[in-house]
Amino acid sequence: MMDKNVIFMSAGEINDELAEIKHEYPDVVFLSTNGKAASVLRTGRLIGNGAGNTQIHAVTGDIEMIINVTVKASENGVRFPLLITRNNGLLPDDIPDDLVRIPKGTWLWNLKADLLVSKKCLDAYTAMAVQAAKEDVVMRVTSAYRSYNDQIEALSIQARRYGEKRAKELGAPAGFSEHQLGLALDLGGWIDESGIQMTKNEEVYKWIDDNCYKYGFMIKNPLGKEHITGGIYEPWHIRYIGDLDIARYVHERGITLNEYLEQL
């Protein structure tokens, strides 16, 4: 293992360093331990997201290189949608400061009590769900914010149900799930109080695939992009990115957030 302390290197110098590693080891896999400070793309390009520290791991075969990075806040910097993937994580104590409770009941189509999500995500979802209902597609939230420990528990349940290998395919490791951001929702079709499924899940998936971008959402793990996102196809999982222009751009081109950032 090689540890390079590059705290005093500029962003350009760090990107040059990562590009050299990528050139020397084409199959290298990069990982950022704190995506809120900086995300790292497959190409090795670093994107600063906010003040903080992160470690960039470059792994290939039995070689692991670690680069310590400190990001300083910039008032003039361009802000991009935060990339949280199986290669860009969050710290265990990273909790959004704008979480609100999703009301239980038909207005917001949530069967579960005590679901939390970012307020801006909830506002956008509410507008989207109201419009979908007008088109006879009534949806419900099945999962929203999950803390680091919640994700550990979710994976433990999956492992008991499907086995360790399948559980790792189905869910991101704790600290690498968008649900910890408070900006991700899992959706399904409406089930009435007697337990009867009134709207098929597939109807919801089709509707959000066609329309969620209009409200600032995107399908984070689309079909055929598993080799890019690192996750399985999840038609029920939407990510709020907020910027309507970016949401439309990725939708119209059928690309992932990873690919969008790589184009910049």
Image: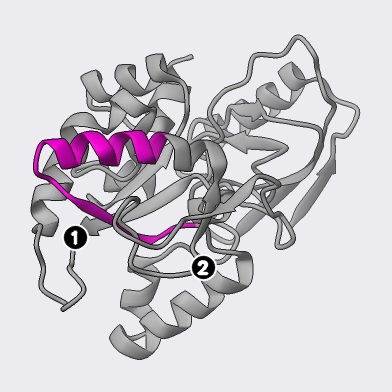
Q: Nearer the viewer, residue 25 or 164?
A: 164
Q: Please tell me in which quadrant of the rendered image residue 166 appears.
A: bottom left
Q: Nearer the viewer, residue 59 or 192?
A: 192
Please name the amino acid that badge 1 sits on: Trp
Residue 86 in the figure: left or right of residue 18: left
Q: Quadrant of the N terminus?
A: bottom right
In the drawing, what numbered circle is on residue 114? 2
Q: What residue appears at the point 42 percent right and 33 percent down from the top-left corner?
A: 258
At label 1, counting other C-alpha atoms closer than 10 Å, the crowd grade (few under 14, some 14-19, many 20 or more) is many
Q: What residue appears at the point 49 percent right and 48 percent down from the top-left corner?
A: 85
Is residue 26 visible to us here? no
The secondary element bearing badge 1 is classed as loop
Name the residue carrying label 1: 190
Residue 201 in the figure: left or right of residue 78: left
Q: Which segment is the magenta one?
A: 124-144
Residue 127 in the figure: left or right of residue 94: left
- Relative to 224, does residue 75 appear above or below in the rendering? above
Residue 49: percent from the left, percent from the top?
68, 30
Q: Are marks 2 and 1 in contact (CB under 8 Å)?
A: no
Q: Is residue 143 magenta?
A: yes
Residue 80: percent from the left, percent from the top?
56, 23
What colour-coding does the image apply?
one colour
Q: Is residue 114 magenta?
A: no
The secondary element bearing badge 2 is classed as loop
- Relative to 156, does residue 135 appear above or below in the rendering? above
